[in-house]
Image: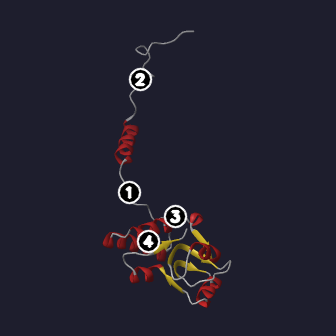
């Protein structure tokens, strides 16, 4: 078998093209930086909500709103749906809960809650209001509680 010496072979140690070195430099430059997650949605209501959540995070240093914005900026396939039975299991009476997605009406709920979500099904809204709970949008909750204290995120 005839093995070539590295000094004889120019192909093994050829210099990479300039375009690939530029790409590598930009990759290495951006590797350690924290960048904001891109908004992929074309829904104007959703994009405005994500922007306002990020703005509230900066103004009030409330990390809760950043977490909600990150959950809402997922693709539609990864968006969160929560049933009332899950809310019943993971909450107590009088708690304030944020669902960064849609609340569905499957299951029973035994105690009153303050629920803020991006969307509610009709059945979920009627069941929550029936037990003297409150259904509100996420911007309404942000206005009531800008610091986000006492807010629980259900995913």
Task: Look at mark 3 in the image and give the residue it sits on.
Answer: 74
Seen in the picture, residue 127 relative to 80 is either above or below; the reply is below
Q: Mark 3, residues whose alpha carbon is within 10 Å: few (<14), some, or many (≥20)?
A: some
Q: Residue 75 falls in which quadrant of the image?
A: bottom right
Residue linked to disc 1 = 35
In terms of sequence position, does the residue under pointer 1 or pointer 3 come before the other? 1
Q: Position of residue 137 (x, y in %)?
A: 49, 82
Identify the secondary structure beneath mark 4.
helix
> Measuring 53% from the left and 74% from the top, which residue is drawn there?
99
Q: Which color scheme did the rendering employ for the protein? A: secondary structure
Give the CA distance from mark 2 to mark 3: 43 Å
* Lower sequence index among marks 2 and 1: 2
Residue lying furthest top: 1
Label 2 to label 4: alpha-carbon separation: 49 Å
Relative image position of residue 153 (x, y in whole percent): 50, 71
> What residue is shown with label 4?
50
**SS state under label 3:** loop
Circle nearer the N terminus (3, 4): 4
For the residue pair 87 and 70, the one nearer the viewer reads as 87
From the top left corner, tell me how far across and down residue 154 is, in percent. Answer: 54, 70
Residue 56 at x, y percent in the picture: 36, 73
- From the image, tell me which residue sits under label 2: 13
Find the residue positioned furthest to the left.
59
């Amino acid at each position: 078998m005839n093995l070539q010496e590295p000094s004889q072979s120019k192909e093994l140690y050829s210099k990479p093209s300039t375009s690939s070195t530029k790409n590598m430099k930009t990759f290495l430059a951006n590797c350690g930086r924290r960048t904001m997650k891109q908004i992929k949605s074309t829904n104007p209501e959703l994009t405005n909500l994500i922007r306002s959540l990020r703005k509230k995070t900066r103004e009030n240093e409330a990390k809760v709103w950043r977490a909600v914005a990150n959950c809402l900026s997922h693709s539609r396939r990864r968006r969160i749906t929560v049933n009332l039975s899950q809310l019943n299991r993971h909450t107590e009476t009088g708690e304030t809960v944020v669902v960064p997605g849609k609340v569905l009406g499957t299951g029973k709920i035994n105690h009153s809650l303050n629920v803020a979500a991006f969307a509610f099904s009709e059945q979920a809204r009627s069941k929550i209001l029936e037990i003297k709970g409150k259904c509100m949008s996420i911007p309404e909750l942000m206005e009531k509680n800008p610091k986000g204290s006492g807010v629980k995120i259900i995913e």
